[in-house]
Image (spheres, grey):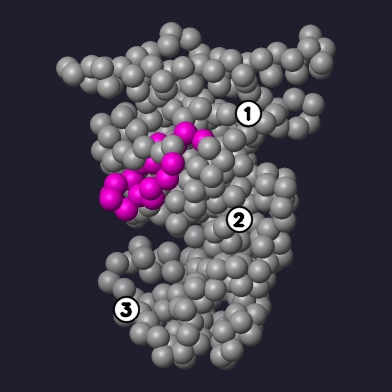
């Protein structure tokens, strides 16, 4: 089969898959309204091979059916849902706390918890595409929770899973959550589900809570650099990925690699107060933080966050945001000027928790 014929077949598969998802969604909705007995499940006894990359570019799926957003009360998931709802997509919003989920047109809210597999069955059934956002918890345990979600998606025959991972995900990473994300990715790949893995750089606004009351951020980052990214760009990229065919693994980064000292200096200009970075040896940081945090794994996270920056795990920039969204990623200044309320964390005199 030639390239031209292959493209035609792929387009037909995409549209037939979309029609199938829409029909299934309508039938299930009608059946639930009409059926007064035990919960009714409908099944279509066939599946199509998901759309694939052809001719060097990822084909755009014009309407991916019902999209599941996990962790929908969180900042990135909520913003992703808002972007998709604005474009008219049918959404299912999963959260452990349904009262905290956003109210959006064309969206239903379901309770779901990665630790409760029965809730995952209900959440994943009947969806064509799913965004799996990281669960909260201790490294290792968190990866097992993610596995529950991936296995639920596999049982529901979800056609495309988009997983939000971390740049630098690797078994030898300095950052415990990056090691955890690597393990989670292996669990996802083991299901053989069509997927897109978005490895996000550290969020640029994570720095805001790391400055102490005196405007100092301390940690063993040395002169390392990171391509820190805005949550807005992460949400826009996730929303775009959910509209496309499965596309592999991508780093999602900001436009430039900054040192922690660079971040402090540029934030200082925005908030009109002195902010600075003090490098700190790893053992000194661990001892200092252990006096404030009784859980050793949380201390490991705080120290490892800076050590990953020092090791250069996040220094590489990518064109993923531009490639997926058609718009370049926001600079530090552009992001905080667009969302100035985030900078309240650095206002002098604010009652703040001890920097971690």
Q: Is residue 73 above or below residue 85?
A: below
The residue beneath circle 3 is 292
The residue beneath circle 1 is 61
**Callout 1: SS:** loop
Q: Locate residue 264, reporting x and y percent.
A: 60, 81
Identify which residue is drawn at 28% across, 21% down.
Answer: 32
Q: In the image, is residue 99 part of the stretch drawn in magenta?
A: yes
Badge 3: few (under 14), some or many (20 or more) residues near its Cα, within 10 Å? few
The boundaries of the magenta stretch are 89-105
Badge 1: few (under 14), some or many (20 or more) residues near its Cα, within 10 Å? some
* Image quarter hosting the C terminus: bottom left
Identify which residue is drawn at 43% across, 88% down.
Answer: 213
Q: Locate residue 181, reporting x and y percent.
A: 48, 48
Is residue 249 toward the left or the right of residue 344 in the image?
A: right
Q: Are marks 1 and 2 in contact (CB under 8 Å)?
A: no
Q: Which mark is residue 233?
A: 2
Q: Earlier in the sequence, mark 1 or mark 3?
A: 1
């Amino acid at each position: 089969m030639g390239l031209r014929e292959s493209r035609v077949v792929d387009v037909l598969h995409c549209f037939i898959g979309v029609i199938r998802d829409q029909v299934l969604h309508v039938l299930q909705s009608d059946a639930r309204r009409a059926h007064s007995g035990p919960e009714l499940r409908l099944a279509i006894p066939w599946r199509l091979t998901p759309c694939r990359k052809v001719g060097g570019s990822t084909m755009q799926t014009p309407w991916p059916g019902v999209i599941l957003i996990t962790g929908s009360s969180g900042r990135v998931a909520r913003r992703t849902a808002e972007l998709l709802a604005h474009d008219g997509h049918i959404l299912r919003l999963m959260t452990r706390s349904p009262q905290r989920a956003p109210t959006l047109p064309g969206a239903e809210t379901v309770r779901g918890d990665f630790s409760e597999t029965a809730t995952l069955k209900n959440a994943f059934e009947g969806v064509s595409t799913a965004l799996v956002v990281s669960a909260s918890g201790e490294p290792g345990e968190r990866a097992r929770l993610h596995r529950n979600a991936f296995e639920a998606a596999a049982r529901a025959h979800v056609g495309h899973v988009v997983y939000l991972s971390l740049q630098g995900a690797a078994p030898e990473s300095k950052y415990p959550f990056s090691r955890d994300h690597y393990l989670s990715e292996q669990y996802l790949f083991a299901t053989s589900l069509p997927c897109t893995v978005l490895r996000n750089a550290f969020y640029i606004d994570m720095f805001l809570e790391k400055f102490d009351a005196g405007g100092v951020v301390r940690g063993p980052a040395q002169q390392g650099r990171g391509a820190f990214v805005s949550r807005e760009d992460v949400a826009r990229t996730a929303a775009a990925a959910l509209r496309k065919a499965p596309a592999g693994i991508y780093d999602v980064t900001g436009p430039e690699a900054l040192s922690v000292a660079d971040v402090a200096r540029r934030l200082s200009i925005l908030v009109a107060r002195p902010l600075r970075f003090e490098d700190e040896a790893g053992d000194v940081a661990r001892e200092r933080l252990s006096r404030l945090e009784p859980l050793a794994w949380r201390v490991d996270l705080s120290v490892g966050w800076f050590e990953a920056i020092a090791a250069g795990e996040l220094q590489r920039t990518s064109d993923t945001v531009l490639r997926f969204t058609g718009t370049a990623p926001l600079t530090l200044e552009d992001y905080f000027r667009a969302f100035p309320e985030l900078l309240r964390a650095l206002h002098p005199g604010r009652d703040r928790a001890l920097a971690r």
